[in-house]
Image (cartoon, rainbow, N blue to C red):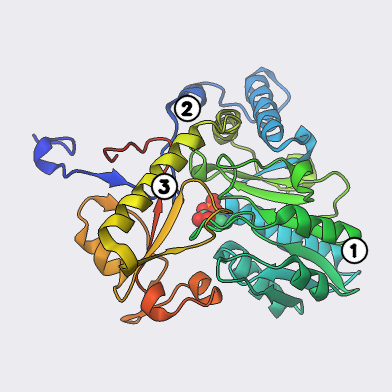
Amino acid sequence: MKTLNDPLYRTERIYLDYNASTPIDPAVALAMEPFLHDHYGNPSSGHWASFDAKAALETARGQVAELLGCNGEEIVFTSGGSEANNLALKGAFFALRYKGDHVITTRIEHPAIIEPCRFLERLGARITYLPVDKSGRVDPDDLRQAITPRTILISIMHANNEIGTIQPIEECARIARERGVLFHTDAAQSVGKIATDVNGLGVDLLSIAGHKLYAPKGVGALFVRRGAQLEPIIHGAGHESGRRAGTESAMLAVGLGKACELARDLASMDGVRVLRDHFWLELQSRFGNRIALNGHPAHRLPNTLNVSFINCIGAEILNGLDGVAASTGSACHSGRIELSPVLEAMGITPEVGMGAIRFSLGRGTTREGA
Ligand SMILES: Cc1ncc(COP(=O)(O)O)c(C=O)c1O
């Protein structure tokens, strides 16, 4: 019987979609393995069957905290980046509504920020969506000017998922602190690729997503600075110090913890950056001025290369590249291809933006492919 690994079924495969999801690191899988078979106790129980699970959960919390430079009590495990973002936005809005109703974010956030903002608008929130320049960066002066006495939260992503542009978070967070406004950053794409120390960044809330950093899907975390006011969005028993109800999965937390431990060593990103830049040079020598780089040339994630093939359609190019896994930001709606909102916000024309392809490299990428 033929299996999927049979050479007859295999095409050459090249995975360049690490910003969409990473494989699980073998060390992460190994750490999680015992929780599939043993350690099944409920971490909240008070008997022998829970002790290993509880201890592992707290060790994992410490590993996440260590990566972010905070205390374990400031980490709330979630089901992923989307939930962490929802908890930050809705939790802050519900807790601080007595103070104001104004939230500031940017036009290029992931839908896991934009959609909760739209939801809050339906509840009466006023949201300011800051513009970005042609490289995808916000201007801290725009932020300064947008803050009003009714501003209760600012949420600006650390690095953009499509173009990799890194925002001036330190400066934006400083402005927020001076004005006494809570500051959140969605670091789902930056954790494990660049430094994400919460005190260095100066943020009050920070979201991470396990499956972007070699942990499994279905787990993430929100850093909540001690003293920050946040209403839970999942009410129930007192898990996660009353901030997120639901029996914790020690197995998933252990996976995230191990992945965070590995992510402290950013040295592997140097090699990834070299490969990414080599790929860009190769493309340039082949396509010349028929391609354009999207995103900031320097303030950019080391693994991300968003390239526009001018006057082409990115999805069509990808369809023709058998075995290559990469992404295009443009979405097909009712037969019409629409420009990615991120590229649109950067002022990129449809002729350039429609041909955009995001190549994102990772630990497993080699010069030969893979
Ligand atoms: C910047 C950013 N934020 C949030 C998310 C959502 O994370 P999750 O898939 O874990 O819910 C993603 C995933 O693509 C992302 O890229």
| Distance between the alpha carbons at the discs numbered 1 and 3 | 40 Å
What percent of the width, then of the height, locates residue 255? 54, 32
Question: Taking 233 as reference, is 64 above or below it?
Answer: above
Depth-wise, is mark 1 or mark 3 nearer the camera?
3
Task: Decide if residue 209 is in sight here.
Answer: yes
State which quarter of the image contains the C terminus: top left
Q: Nearer the viewer, residue 56 or 221?
A: 221
What percent of the width, then of the height, locates residue 226? 85, 43
Question: Taking 175 as reference, is 324 above or below it?
Answer: above
Dot 3: element: helix
**Residue under circle 1?**
179
Q: Earlier in the sequence, mark 1 or mark 3?
A: 1
Residue 130 position by quadrant: bottom right
Question: Taking 250 as reference, is 190 above or below it?
Answer: below
Mark sitting on residue 365: none
Task: Decide if residue 231 is in sight here.
Answer: no
Q: Residues within 10 Å of mark 3 (few under 14, many from 20)?
A: some
**Residue under circle 3?**
277
Q: Which of 2 and 113 is in front in this view?
A: 113
**Tag 2: residue type?**
Leu
Q: Which of 181 and 44 is in front in this view?
A: 181
Q: Earlier in the sequence, mark 3 or mark 2?
A: 2
Depth-wise, is mark 3 or mark 2 nearer the camera?
3
**Residue under circle 2?**
36
Residue depicted at x 33% and y 57%: 284
What percent of the width, then of the height, locates residue 140? 75, 65
Residue depicted at x 64% and y 68%: 116
**Tag 1: residue type?**
Arg
Instruction: For ligand 1, give the image quadrant.
Output: bottom right
